[in-house]
Image (cartoon, rainbow, N blue to C red):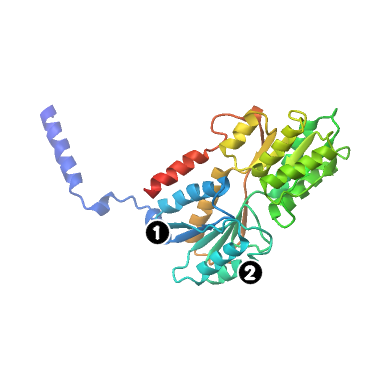
Amino acid sequence: MTIKTMLARTLAAALCLSTLPAFAQETGDPGPAFVQSALAGKKVVLIPLALGFDLAQGWNHYIGSEVRGFGGVWETRDPNWDTAAGAQAITDLISSADKPAAILVHTPDLTSYSKLFKRAQDAGIFVIQVDNRSNFASDAFVGSNWETLGELEAKAAVAACGEGSSKKIGLIQGDQVNSSSLDQYAGIAKVLKDHPDFEIVGAPDSNWDVTTARNVATTLLQQHPEVCSVIDFWDNTAAGTAAAIRDAGLTGKVKLVTTGGGEELDCKALEDGTFHAVVMTDVKGQSRDISALLKFLLQSGLKPGQAKSWIYTLETATTKADLKPGTCWSLKDVQAAEAALAK
């Protein structure tokens, strides 16, 4: 066979392939068509405590991108820290003609939304609780095991104090109604049982307000200047606690441990020594878990209320020594990406 003949036959074969019917090129994989029929057009609504802080903006971007990516409709409702407004948003969605397939809710406390979650499920809406649990076990919870998170904070605080220290620890709690605060305290207390020589000398509430955190931390440090470590229950309020430590002239002597969403401000605070350790709740990882769960539930054939899941985020206490490129995510990048989508 000559080269000319071979080229002619190859060209003929290529022409034949190009004229085959489309079905002859299909893979036989039923997945894409099944996913398309199950997910396309399904509405998913995020109801955070407020949209104006890093966790909520991270969820909005990362989960929203996934929902839009599978052909769904992504919406948010912003209660702006108002529990009544959040309840009204859920009520409106339950009674709307265009009901969502799923709602993702950052609950403010253990009880306020519990009855509404049952009503939503009865209306055919999946309910996924994010970050804070309530007393109602809905279709899923995705977020921190706050007791475990508290244990990680306590171990970091004990290690930061060391054997030769005063072994006195201060806590700046959130409040006495939010599971993330109550369970965090339980985890800290659990670890300190194994370290009976360590003592909690004060545990005021910040009510999740940075100014209040600064004020109560100032009082705590005035009463107990020998404290070797303070655990603040949220990186946002820990900024106020850090200011109190600085004002008291105790920078470097009092180690500040906290928890946060892993936004780049956390990494900067670790880098400059403002925070000694941060238990990061991994917004990207949580968003990926929630997105996968949504895809499963909407394809599963399950009805809301038929199954329950708890998906806890794998977390570690991060210190300056652990920092490397990519440890934290950037809120500025997220906001820029959302602004580009809005154009």
CA gap, disc 2 and disc 1? 29 Å
Residue 5 in the figure: left or right of residue 311: left
Q: Residue at x 82, y 38 (%)?
A: 222
Q: Position of residue 43 (x, y in %)?
A: 45, 61
Query: Tag 2's secondary structure?
Result: helix
In the image, residue 302 sits, relative to residue 191, either above or below, namely: below
In the image, residue 150 sits, relative to residue 84, either above or below, namely: above
Q: Position of residue 144 (x, y in %)?
A: 65, 48
Q: Amino acid at mark 1?
A: Ala
User: Quick one: 53 or 263, which is closer to the camera?
Assistant: 53
User: Quick one: 33 or 178, which is closer to the camera?
Assistant: 178
Residue 10 in which image quadrant: top left
Residue 24 in the figure: left or right of residue 249: left
Q: How many marks?
A: 2
Query: Tag 1's secondary structure?
Result: loop
| Residue holding disc 1 | 40
Query: In the rendered view of the protein, which quadrant contains the N terminus?
Result: top left
User: Quick one: 241 or 340, which is closer to the camera?
Assistant: 241
| Residue holding disc 2 | 115
